[in-house]
Amino acid sequence: MKDFLGSKLYLTSSLNFFFGEALRYFTNYIVNQVPSHCFRLFYYRNILNFKVGRNSFIFMSTYFDRRDNFSIGDNSVINQKCRIDNRAKVTIGSNVSISPEVYILTADHDLQCPFFSGRKRPVLIGDYVFIGTRALILPGVSLGVGSAVAAGAVVTKDVPPYSIVAGIPAKFVKSRNSKLNYKINYGRPFS
């Protein structure tokens, strides 16, 4: 009986893994290449259970690691070829602009652990944040309201509200206007 239960658990675990990988492949190599934003939005909301706010736009070729663990507020945009590692929770606020080829990571390995253990930490991006092309946001980072990350920056620690950071690792450059009041609206049916 014990062997039967063990093999049943192994089979269930294997099937879950297989279907999870099949869903990830379908999402990232088929769905995200469909030029209709309405179709992709329907898929993200109803199949992947993402919380996507009104008038937010996710361009083609955006890669996600799994179902769930992702929310984006109103009037925000994720440009082409971004990588969103949502193995831990990724929360993006409203009126956020994420430029092309940005990587947002939530998982890494503990380099000091003798077993090289994996670890997951959420990423929080506040309202009115701008992230420049090819920036890298590392696990556990919070980007404060109104902050801006320069193109190519590697963000290793939290960014205070209304701060502009640049470089590798990202360092404070100057403050940003704290009276931000704009709406991002791409409104493209195909992209």
Image (cartoon, rainbow, N blue to C red):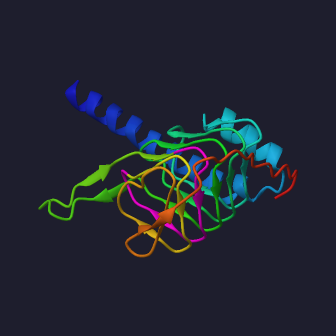
130 magenta-colored:
yes
Q: Quadrant of the N terminus?
A: top left
Q: Quadrant of the C terminus?
A: bottom right
- Magenta extent: 126-140
Task: Decide whether the magenta segment is chiefly helix, strand or loop.
Answer: loop
- Find the residue positioned furthest to the top: 1
| Residue under the image location 69 percent in, 60 percent down | 79
Residue 7 x, y percent position in the rendering: 31, 36
Q: Is residue 184 left or right of residue 159?
A: right
The quarter holding residue 117 reads bottom left
| Residue under the image location 47 percent in, 49 percent down | 161
14 magenta-colored:
no
Return the residue nearer the eye: 40 or 187.
187
Return the residue nearer the eye: 13 or 127.
127
Residue 85 x, y percent position in the rendering: 48, 54
In this rendering, the answer to whether 112 lies above or below 71 is below
Return the residue nearer the eye: 96 or 113.
96
In this rendering, the answer to whether 167 lies above or below 22 is below
Q: Is residue 79 left or right of residue 119?
A: right
In this rendering, the answer to whether 72 lies above or below 159 is above
